[in-house]
Amino acid sequence: MIPVKRLQYMSGSFYLENKIALVTGGASGIGAATSRELTRAGAKVIIADVNFAAAESLAAELAGARAVKMDVTDSASIALAFSSIPQLDILVNNAGIGLVGDISRTSEEDFDRVMQVNVNSVFLVTKEALPLILASRGSIVNIGSVAGSVGVKQRFAYCASKGAVQAMTRQIAVDYPKELRINCIAPGTVQTPFVEGYLEKYHANEKDKVRAELVARQPIGRLGTPEDVASLVRFLCSKEAEFINGAVVPIDGGWTAA
């Protein structure tokens, strides 16, 4: 049997040695990149995902990592996962979904689903994690979107949900200014399986054209990468960022500056 090569951590700036971190939606896309980056920083990562097989597979690659099954819309599932977590220093609320459509084409069921996954999950997971984060004086990073700061065409429910994530971030920072740190990252369009799924579902016959339009939306001239976002997560969780609290940090290639 060929041994699995496990990713090791490196020392240096933005170091997180022996920190315990939980990443929701941690088995793919930005979540997977974040799990890898926090491991490189020295953290022991708990990969929380509804796709437990994928979480286990990624955990096998990362030194000190383990997987937990978690449905972030289900408080019982969240409580069960946290029952095996005695300590937590870092929480990354990454799990999320998107929806295409203006208000006239957004059904009540679809709106509710987006809010459950993108908003309720941040409430439920953070509330369950709060005693552990307070005990460690830890750090929370919420993965938001530029869609929480500016209007994006045909993204009514998604914009609403990501605006709520920004508001929750600021509010928690106000309630717990000395007990923890919490910040929100607002990415532009990032090249993930989510984007590819969007192109396949809505633009199967014109993928290259629409992908070029997505690139053009970022003034820097390219899509973001999961690794771009993961590096910012690492920084915000580090000692070097200890004066940053309640912030919404864009990482969008200049989109919101244009």
Image (cartoon, rainbow, N blue to C red):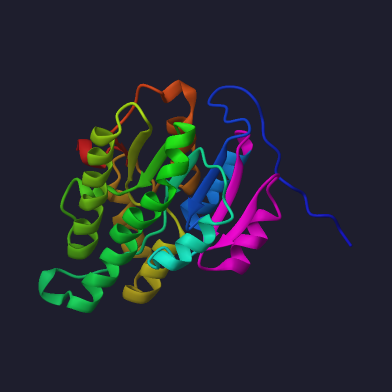
- The residue depicted at 27 percent of the width and 50 percent of the height is 165
Of the 4 image quadrants, the one containing the C terminus is top left
- The residue depicted at 53 percent of the width and 60 percent of the height is 81
Q: Nearer the viewer, residue 26 or 85?
A: 85
- The residue depicted at 54 percent of the width and 53 percent of the height is 32
Image coordinates of residue 84 in percent, x first then y, are 59, 55
Image coordinates of residue 140 in percent, x first then y, are 40, 40
Q: Nearer the viewer, residue 215 or 256?
A: 256
- The residue depicted at 66 percent of the width and 30 percent of the height is 10
Classify residue 78 as left or right of residue 189. right
What residue occupies the far right of the structure in this picture?
A: 1
Residue 66 is covered by the magenta coloring: yes
Image coordinates of residue 57 in percent, x first then y, are 66, 61
Classify residue 74 as left or right of residue 149. right
Q: Is residue 228 visible?
A: no
Residue 107 is covered by the magenta coloring: no
| Residue stretch rendered in magenta on the structure | 40-69
Classify residue 46 as left or right of residue 118. right
Q: Is residue 164 visible?
A: yes
Of the 4 image quadrants, the one containing the N terminus is bottom right
Residue 209 is drawn in which quadrant? bottom left
Instruction: From this view, report whether residue 7 is shown above or below residue 95.
Output: above
Q: How many marks?
A: 0
Residue 134 is drawn in which quadrant? top left
